[in-house]
Each structure stands twice: as structure tokens, then as C-alpha cells.
Amino acid sequence: QEPRTEEQQASFGRALDSVDLWYAHQMTWVWLLTSTPSGTIQPTYHERGWPYFERLVGGLHSHYDMLLDIGRPLESCSDYSDIRESCIASRCVPLTPDAFRTELASKVFARSEECEFLAERYVHTFAVTIGPAESLCYANTGLSAAEAKLLADALGWCTRLLVLSLDGNDLGPEGALAIAAALPGLPQLQGLYANRCGLQRGGAAAIIDGVKETRRIGGMYLSSNDISEDDAAALEDVFLHRHPRSVIHVS
């Protein structure tokens, strides 16, 4: 906090150059203090720019249980293991830098120049975190069809991606179409998991068609998606005709 001595200001400047590392690193536990004391007259957690940046970069590539919302009621928690279990926060969809900049413009900052600073830091963080990622897991994160479209945009940066897991999200046929449109841009993809996503026949067919030119695809897992046995068998045949050495499960 200000005021700072000259030495403190220099240290603060150095810290800003790597501020994203603290939140985006896969070995970092990120605690979100989303609540404020009653009677506090200031913008809420969700209205402020810095917490928005910290939450998004904290969820870009972290393990599902390492992003904790400590703003939730903790009265029933007797130890840290209880806190971990009850405070797991839902991860936000990774936004492309352009989409992030648009959202960030609506947030509140103490200084206007901080908005541009965080927008630039996000570009760097996104590129070094999502770009080289070989595995992305968004299973059971509550992704909707609309959010699947945002994720599809982000997948355009993931040219090294090997495994994509989307199990347990309500993507539906609309979300599946969005994801399918991004699959041709993932030439290294080896495995895709979209079980229990409500894909239905049309959504599953779109995803299978999306990897038709992906030579390294080894496994496609699309079970429990409200697809009849006959349709599932037909879709599996289409996939295996193109990828005879691969594995697929559709239902």
C-alpha cells in the first residue's frame, strides 16, 4: 500500500512484472476472498478489476480443487480439509485476450492505467499458460453451451493440446457444435472426453466430424449422451473407418 519508500517502490515494480505467476502456476493454491464485511462502502469483489484478473488467471490451468472461494460461509468447517471440500470454486471459462479486455473494461480500478496493465499481463499469461498446454480439463465445471463457444475461441491458441476433457457439462448439441468447430485447429489431439454432456446424436456427430483429419487421435469418449444404440453404432463406424486403430465409445 502507498505511501512507499523508494526501495519499496522498486520491489513493488519487480513484483508486478511477474504478478501473474503467483496465480497461474499449477502448484499455487489460490484463495478467493469474495465477500466483504457488512457495511463496507466499496465495489464488490466481482466489480473490481484486480480480483477479476486474479480469478481468471488462477483458473486457466489449475487443478480443479486448488481454486478456493474463502468468501463462502465457513461455520460448518472444523479443519482445513473441510474448507477445501466446501470452498472449491467453479473455474471460469478461459477467455481469449480480446474477450478478457472487453470484460475488464467494465470493472472498477483505483487508477485507470491499471486496466491496460492487466490487459497486457493477461495476454502474456494466456499465451504462456494455455498456448503450450498439452492437457486441459474442464470436467464438471458447469460449462453451458454459451461458455462452450468462449472455450472454443480459446482452443484456437492450443496447437500443442493432446487431451481435452469436458465430461459432465451441459454442452448440448449447440455447445458441441462450437467445440467441434475448434477441433481442426488441434492437430496434435490424441484424446477427447465428453461423457455426460447431453450431446445427442447431432452433437456427437459434429465432434466426430471435427477430428476427421486429426491423424493422432487415439480415443474418443462420448458416453451417456442420450444417443440410441443404432445411432451410436453408426457414429462409431464412421469414426473407426477414418481412424481404424483408435478407440471410441458412444452412447
Image (tube, rainbow, N blue to C red):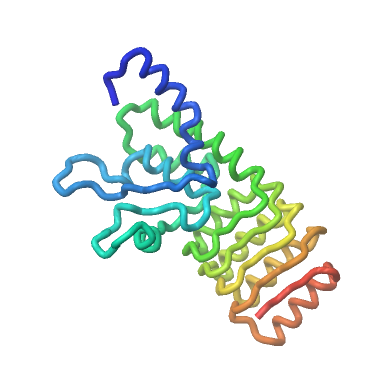
Quarter of image, res 89: bottom left
Residue in the foreground of this view, choosing between 181 and 6: 6
| Residue 107, percent from left and from top | 35, 40
Identity of the residue furthest to the front in this view? 79
Residue in the foreground of this view, choosing between 185 and 159: 159
Identity of the residue furthest to the left in this view? 39
Q: Is residue 34 left or right of residue 234?
A: left
Which part of the image, by quadrant, shows the C terminus? bottom right
Which part of the image, by quadrant, shows the N terminus? top left
Residue at point 31%, 49% (across, down): 34
Residue at point 35%, 62% (across, down): 82
Residue at point 42%, 42% (across, down): 54
Residue at point 62%, 51% (across, down): 155
Q: Is residue 192 above or below residue 118?
A: below
Q: Is residue 20 above or below residue 242?
A: above
Quarter of image, res 205: bottom right
Identity of the residue furthest to the top in this view? 6
| Residue 133, percent from left and from top | 64, 47
| Residue 49, percent from left and from top | 37, 38
Q: Is residue 153 above or below residue 228?
A: above
| Residue 157, percent from left and from top | 64, 45
Q: How many marks?
A: 0
Q: Is residue 194 left or right of residue 98?
A: right
